């Protein structure tokens, strides 16, 4: 196993075009090895096996709410946009773990947290400009 390599696989340059935003400097898009290593060292402490195990009951509770939300559509046969439901699930998990607050945005697509998160992640990312 390689533990200290100056070569990072799959770290190509991302250009976010005219919508370039703070996402281009995150761990996901980081091309500079030293910045990537520093960010990964800091972020890795939040994702140890024990910490992930502690988070599971909260994730299961939110997943149960997602299932209840989806069953509403299943029982009536109503068409719906699954993306909104999955984005809501993801944001509920993030909000629970980062901010320590429990919100339920599955049925409230106008919730300020969801609206602002959609603005933040609306960058048009592409490999080449």
Image (cartoon, rainbow, N blue to C red):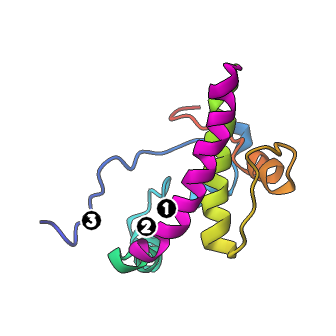
The percent position of residue 108, horizontal first and vertical second, equals 83, 46
- Residue range in magenta is 52-78
Q: Is residue 37 above or below residue 63?
A: below
Whether residue 71 is in magenta: the answer is yes
For the question of whether residue 124 can be seen, the reply is no
Residue assigned mark 1? 27
Quadrant of the image occupied by residue 75: top right
**SS for dot 2:** helix
For the question of whether residue 69 can be seen, the reply is yes
Residues packed near mark 1 inside 10 Å, few (<14), some (14 to 19) or many (20 plus): some
Residue assigned mark 3? 6
Image depth: mark 3 or mark 1 in front: 1
Whether residue 67 is in magenta: the answer is yes
Question: Which residue is at a point 57% across and 61% down the rendered structure image?
Answer: 61
Along the polypeptide, which appears first: circle 3 or circle 1?
3
Q: Looking at the figure, which quarter contains the N terminus?
A: bottom left
Question: Which residue is at a point 70% across and 52% down the rendered structure image?
Answer: 21
Which disc number belongs to residue 125? none
Q: Is residue 64 above or below residue 48?
A: above
The percent position of residue 26, horizontal first and vertical second, equals 55, 60
Question: Which residue is at a point 58% across and 41% down the rendered structure image?
Answer: 15
The percent position of residue 14, horizontal first and vertical second, equals 52, 43
**SS for dot 1:** loop
Residue assigned mark 2? 36
Q: Is residue 119 above or below residue 102?
A: above
Question: Which residue is at a point 66% across and 58% down the rendered structure image?
Answer: 92
- Please report contact status of discs 2 and 1: CB closer than 8 Å, yes or no: yes
Residues packed near mark 3 inside 10 Å, few (<14), some (14 to 19) or many (20 plus): few
Give how far apart the Cα atoms at labels 2 and 1 are. Answer: 6 Å
């Amino acid at each position: 196993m390689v533990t200290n390599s100056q070569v990072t696989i799959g770290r190509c340059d991302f250009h976010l075009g005219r919508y370039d935003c703070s996402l281009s400097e995150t761990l996901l898009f980081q091309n500079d090895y030293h910045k990537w290593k520093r960010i990964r060292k800091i972020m890795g402490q939040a994702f140890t096996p024990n910490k992930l195990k502690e988070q599971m009951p909260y994730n299961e509770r939110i997943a149960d709410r997602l299932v209840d939300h989806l069953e509403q559509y299943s029982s009536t046969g109503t068409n719906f946009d699954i993306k909104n439901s999955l984005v809501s699930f993801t944001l509920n998990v993030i909000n629970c773990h980062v901010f320590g607050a429990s919100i339920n945005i599955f049925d409230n697509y106008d919730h300020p947290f969801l609206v602002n998160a959609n603005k933040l992640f609306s960058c048009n990312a592409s490999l080449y400009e």
